[in-house]
Image (cartoon, helix red, strand yellow):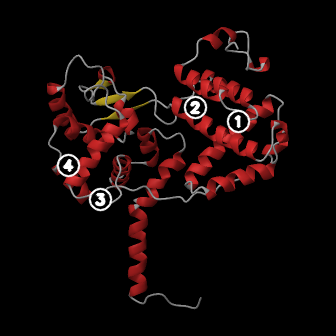
């Protein structure tokens, strides 16, 4: 079987044909797994994964798409179905219920459902399923949690137990720039401008949105100490024995949480980003400015922090309560 034999010709343009033979190892790995599955529509799943790779989706997105579509096709096969053209809305609803019965988090169910909608749109474009299948999409209501910021007293405790120069610089950069840990671990020395006190993030971790973040005085001091010690031949700003991966950084952070006796408060490395946003809003930064620093495409994402730390709302509440407690409210309701 040739590499392109399972790809419908309708999605191969003349300028893409040559690219079929130059696929990423990650896509090759997924395709090899697809070809071993005895499920309905695997030829379309293979072509869909190659399509997403050509659209420059990240490996994490490819993995999420593969898992969601594989699980649905397995569920569909277990129902005794063999033709994708026969997919009906009630089968999609039953698939959602099966995920909920398995105890998956509501956020996971919603994410997998989004991946499934994208696959179905692809099938519609290939005239495999009818467009009416997406007319009444299932909507999963997800709780709108407040971001969990770290209390100022806990920040002081955390920083007070970090003695390693590299680790202190790493935590402070996350705390003072709002970078995601994945973004920081990809920062190379050429992306750092210590003289201008900024870091260039050429591609955001979640939405591929590039931005510039700035370095406060304490971060510059911590970075200068780290730069004196680090191996000048290394490409990345932070590294371990080889490159520093997420799990290694997570273990470092957890170790310091335990040392500061904060391990039971639910703090994560992402809490440093939440703390950054909350403190800047408390200090009076405009929401539009914070949006750019955080790399949010939608300002509604940034507005969540205003719910967490709106000083004007707090002041209005206590001003009104003072009037109420004095008994100065008159009239009937």
User: Who's the residue at 80% across and 49% down the image?
Assistant: 89
Q: Is residue 30 visible?
A: yes
* CB under 8 Å between discs 2 and 4: no
Q: Which mark is residue 119?
A: 1
Tell me: 54 left or right of 137.
left
Question: Is tag 2's residue or tag 1's residue first in the polypeptide sequence?
Answer: 2
Tell me: 124 left or right of 176.
right
In which image quadrant can residue 139 be found? bottom right
Spatial distance from mark 1 to mark 3, Cα to Cα?
42 Å
Q: Nearer the viewer, residue 205 or 282?
A: 205
Q: Which mark is residue 136?
A: none
User: Who's the residue at 76% across and 35% down the image?
Assistant: 40
For discs 1 and 4, the disc positioned in front in the rendered view: 1
Q: Which mark is residue 159?
A: 4
Question: Is tag 2's residue or tag 4's residue first in the polypeptide sequence?
Answer: 2
> Regarding mark 3 in the picture, which secondary structure is present there?
loop
Does 126 sit above or below residue 97? above
Q: Residues within 10 Å of mark 3 (few under 14, many from 20)?
A: few
> Regarding mark 1 in the picture, which secondary structure is present there?
helix
Question: Is tag 4's residue or tag 3's residue first in the polypeptide sequence?
Answer: 3
Spatial distance from mark 3 to mark 2, Cα to Cα?
37 Å
Q: Residues within 10 Å of mark 4 (few under 14, many from 20)?
A: some
Tell me: 126 left or right of 218.
right
For discs 2 and 4, the disc positioned in front in the rendered view: 2
Which residue bears the numbered disc 3? 151
Spatial distance from mark 2 to mark 4, Cα to Cα?
37 Å
Spatial distance from mark 4 to mark 3, Cα to Cα?
12 Å
Question: Is tag 1's residue or tag 4's residue first in the polypeptide sequence?
Answer: 1
Q: Nearer the viewer, residue 323 or 137?
A: 137
């Amino acid at each position: 079987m040739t590499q392109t034999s399972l790809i419908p010709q309708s999605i191969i343009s003349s300028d893409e044909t040559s690219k079929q033979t130059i696929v990423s190892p990650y896509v090759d790995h997924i395709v090899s797994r697809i070809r071993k599955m005895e499920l309905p529509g695997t030829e379309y799943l293979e072509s869909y994964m190659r399509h997403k790779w050509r659209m420059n989706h990240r490996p994490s997105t490819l993995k999420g798409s593969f898992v969601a579509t594989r699980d649905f096709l397995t569920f569909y096969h277990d129902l005794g179905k063999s033709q994708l053209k026969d997919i009906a809305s009630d089968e999609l609803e039953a698939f959602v219920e099966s995920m909920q019965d398995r105890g998956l988090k509501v956020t996971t169910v919603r994410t997998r459902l989004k991946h499934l909608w994208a696959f179905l749109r692809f099938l519609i474009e290939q005239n495999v399923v009818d467009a009416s299948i997406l007319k009444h999409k299932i909507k999963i209501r997800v709780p709108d949690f407040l971001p969990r910021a770290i209390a100022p007293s806990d920040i002081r405790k955390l920083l007070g137990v970090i003695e390693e120069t590299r680790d202190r610089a790493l935590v402070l950069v996350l705390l003072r720039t709002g970078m995601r840990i994945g973004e920081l671990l990809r920062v190379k020395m050429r992306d750092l401008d210590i003289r201008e006190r900024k870091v260039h993030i050429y591609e955001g971790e979640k939405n591929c949105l590039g931005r510039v973040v700035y370095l406060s005085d304490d971060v510059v001091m911590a970075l200068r100490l780290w730069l004196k010690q680090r191996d000048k031949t290394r490409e990345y700003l932070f590294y371990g024995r080889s490159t520093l991966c997420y799990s290694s950084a997570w273990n470092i952070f957890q170790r310091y949480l335990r040392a500061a006796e904060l391990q039971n408060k639910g703090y994560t490395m992402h809490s440093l980003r939440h703390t950054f946003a909350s403190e800047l809003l408390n200090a009076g930064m405009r929401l539009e400015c914070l949006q750019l620093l955080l790399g949010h495409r939608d300002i509604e994402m940034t507005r969540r922090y205003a719910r967490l730390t709106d000083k004007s709302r707090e002041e209005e509440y206590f001003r009104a309560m003072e009037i109420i407690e004095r008994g100065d409210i008159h009239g009937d309701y």
